[in-house]
Amino acid sequence: MKKNILICIALICISILFSSCAKENYPFTASARDYYFEGYIYSMNENCRLTYRKADSMEESILCFDPLCNHGQDCPAYVSGRQPEMIVARTSDNEVCVYYTDEVFSFENNKQDEYLLYCFNTSTGKKTAVLSGLADRINSFYFYGNDIYMIMQSAVLDESGNTVGYGTNICKVLMDGSELTKLTDFKEQSVNIAAIAETEGKTAVYWIDYYDNRTLYVSPTDFSEKTKLTDNVPLYGNFVHGNTLYYSTDSTTTAPALITEAYPGDKDKNEDGTRTIYRERKLSAYYSLDLTKSGAEAELVYDGVNNPNLVETPMWTDGTKLYVIPYDPEFYEVIAADLNGTLTGDIVTDSLPNSVQIDYIASYSGAKIIEIDLVSGTQREIATSGFDAHKIIGCENGKIILLGDVVDCDKIRAKLAEEGVRSSSFMFSEIQVIDISE
């Protein structure tokens, strides 16, 4: 009996040991430059330091927990390259880790720049390199299961070794940084991953080919073949929730409309001495695609939201409501300064006298976001007064977290006066939390 008890205890200990050392098994997760996770926003500040803050707070803290650190270039929160792509995730050991890209630039002759993927453990405060010494830049990366998929940009060289173009390819590596594999071999191509999912028992990669009219394709993980899922309709934006891919395309039912807007760069003159610019306004259609079924038809969710033209459509969904940011330009008050630095303002209409040399404060989203009910198809506009949202960071507990530009003229004027700025051109970005509860 005692022997059996000891065997049982040993088996339990082994089970605990293996479960604590188990590999991560993440659902499809895409990187972003501002990442929302469990009530916190992770980003990089203007001093090239990784930061975190509560979504409803304006106070940022540097992602370094050493009380003796002076947060110089040796600080684990220091980022030497451009703004990183990041994913924040909780591991099987219940530790929160921040994975992010970085770059080390070399000014020495015949030495390549170095690209890296780091993991910062917020529990231990330690930073480790998952990948280092890469010659190709990591544009974005994705978690799925025990693998990290990456979009990597490499130079295309001619026979003399001169760069003649750039190609982006899909690569895969294990979570520990081993077994780096190049999955595609595109030349002068631009691609991105829209989703990775189990489709009828096999892992499939859904990806966008930007050189082919932003077409959506699906391939097995070895990319031995590809199947076109959208045809003659560009894909502008996408978001994955559960096993469903949501994406936007040009509307097929509503004809474009021509609108007239004031714009400072237009050189054409009207007979009445004013200047105007014409911009075509299109409409978008939104679709959902079941990723579990091979050959599944995409279903129309909503048709008629203003199209973002050539930018990515920001969207977010919880599977019940779909939130999107429309491209709906609306010009507000002009911010200008006279020779004495006195701030003035005028209201912008559809044209201005050519003698007026001032800049516009424009809201490309129309100072609003759109909520679409995925069951009923009804649409609701949610105002973001004085704020031009251009990215949805996250949504939780009846509130949506947005990144955008301030278009509140009184706020801009106050900041100009505070900083002693006399330029009539000024804009600043911030994160805002908007209440979306009805």
Image: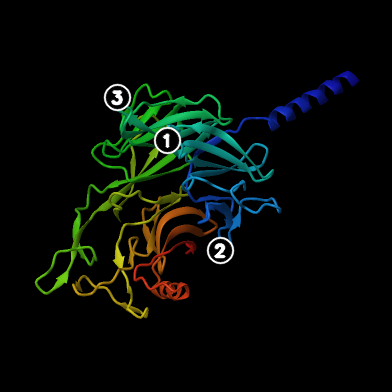
Q: Mark 1: which secondary structure? A: strand
Is the C-beta separation of discs 1 and 3 under 8 Å? no
Residue drawn 62% across the image and 52% down it: 71
Horizontal arrangement in the rendering, residue 176 relative to residue 211 (left or right):
right
Q: Position of residue 248 (x, y in %)?
A: 33, 46
Q: Can residue 23 be seen by looking at this rendering?
A: yes
Q: Mark 3 points at which residue?
A: 159
Tally of numbered discs: 3
Between residue 210 and residue 419, name the one nearer to us: 419
Is the C-beta separation of discs 1 and 2 under 8 Å? no
Residue drawn 88% across the image and 18% down it: 3
Horizontal arrangement in the rendering, residue 115 relative to residue 229 (left or right):
right
Q: Name the residue under label 1.
A: 151
Q: Position of residue 341 (x, y in %)?
A: 37, 78
Between residue 301 and residue 258, name the one nearer to us: 258
Q: Say which of marks 1 and 3 sits in front.
A: 3
Sooner in the amino-acid sequence: mark 1 or mark 2: 2
Residue drawn 30% across the image and 34% down it: 165
Q: Position of residue 4 (x, y in %)?
A: 85, 20
Colouring used for the render: rainbow
Q: Mark 2 points at which residue?
A: 58
Give the CA distance from mark 1 to mark 3: 25 Å
Callout 1: few (<14), some (14-19), or many (20+) C-alpha neighbours within 10 Å? many
Between residue 100 and residue 7, name the one nearer to us: 100
Amino acid under disc 2: Met
